[in-house]
Image (spheres, rainbow, N blue to C red):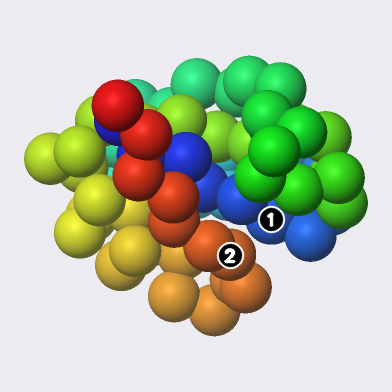
Amino acid sequence: MRILRFENVHKVMEAEKRLKNAGVKAELAPLPRDLSEECGVCLEIADPDEARARDALLDLDFAVIERP
């Protein structure tokens, strides 16, 4: 699983829409506090979808975090 972390909830919502349009399944989830206290929410995607997600979100500032 990959966690996509954004600086604010507006970017999370924009990313969720773009990922859906790109056919990438993304799940809205609370952002673990050990990762950041910035936004409070994140998107979770499956590992194999990372490349398609990056392509869909090229102009958005985000971080990808690997989680078991």
Q: Which residue is mark 2?
A: 62
Q: Position of residue 21 (x, y in %)?
A: 40, 41
Q: Quadrant of residue 52?
A: bottom left
Q: As drawn, is 49 to the left or to the right of 34?
A: left
Does 39 sit above or below residue 29?
A: below
**Amino acid under disc 1:** Phe
Crowd around label 2: few <14 · some 14–19 · many ≥20 (10 Å):
some
Q: As drawn, is 12 to the left or to the right of 46?
A: right
Instruction: State how far apart marks 1 and 2 are (Cα).
Output: 5 Å
Does 66 sit above or below residue 6?
A: above
User: Residue placed farthest to the left in the image?
Assistant: 48
Q: Secondary structure at mark 2?
A: strand
User: Residue placed farthest to the bottom in the image?
Assistant: 59
Q: Is residue 6 visible?
A: yes
Q: Position of residue 11 (x, y in %)?
A: 73, 55
Q: Secondary structure at mark 1?
A: strand
Q: Position of residue 53 (x, y in %)?
A: 33, 53
Q: Quadrant of residue 58?
A: bottom left
Q: Position of residue 59 (x, y in %)?
A: 54, 79
Q: Which residue is mark 1?
A: 6
Counting residues from the start of the chain, the first of labels 1 and 2 encountered is: 1
Crowd around label 1: few <14 · some 14–19 · many ≥20 (10 Å):
many
CB under 8 Å between discs 1 and 2: yes
**Amino acid under disc 2:** Phe
Q: Residue at x 44, y 50 (%)?
A: 65
